[in-house]
Amino acid sequence: MCIHFPENAIMHKVSCSIADNLIYLKCRINRSEELSFIFDSGATFNVLDIAKAKEIGIDLSDKRKSEKTGIEYIQAEIIEIGIGGIVIH
């Protein structure tokens, strides 16, 4: 993972909103328009609606099934996440 800050800064202020005790951040996935995501520092993975993933061109061909729960999911590779002026590769 590589994180780029604007103008070589080591910190960057990111705006967020709070509703129902959840923190929402505006993010861009693979240079998409801004989308709202819940910030969960304890989450193991990120979740994106399938219709939105298709709309922004994410490859959804890698279908898998959880060995523990039996729930089916799609493993997708995200090239970059943009939050404010920060870009995470």
Image: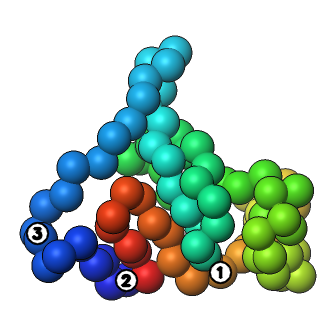
Describe residue 6's horizontal placement relative to residue 50 as left or right.
left
**Residue 30 at x, y percent in the picture:** 60, 75
Crowd rating for badge 1 (residues with CA inside 10 Å; few <14, some 14–19, many 20+): few
Residue beneath disc 2: 1
How does the figure colour the protein chain or chains? rainbow
Describe residue 3's horizontal placement relative to residue 38 as left or right.
left
Q: CA distance from mark 2 to mark 3?
A: 16 Å
Task: Compare residues 30 and 72 and report the one nearer the observer.
Answer: 30
Instruction: Determine the image quadrant of residue 68.
Output: bottom right
Q: Is residue 69 visible?
A: no
Nearer-N-terminus badge (1/2) = 2
Taking the spot 80% from the left edge, 76% from the top edge, the residue there is: 57
Crowd rating for badge 3 (residues with CA inside 10 Å; few <14, some 14–19, many 20+): few
Q: CA distance from mark 1 to mark 2?
A: 13 Å
Taking the spot 43% from the left edge, 82% from the top edge, the residue there is: 89
Residue beneath disc 3: 10
Residue beneath disc 1: 77
Front of the two marks 2 and 3:
3
**Residue 88 at x, y percent in the picture:** 40, 74
Identified by mark 3, the residue type is: Ile
Task: Compare residues 65 and 79 and report the one nearer the observer.
Answer: 79
Nearer-N-terminus badge (3/1) = 3
Up-down relation of residue 29 to residue 76 (above or below) = above
Taking the spot 17% from the left edge, 76% from the top edge, the residue there is: 7
Identified by mark 1, the residue type is: Glu
Identified by mark 2, the residue type is: Met
Which disc, if any, is residue 61?
none
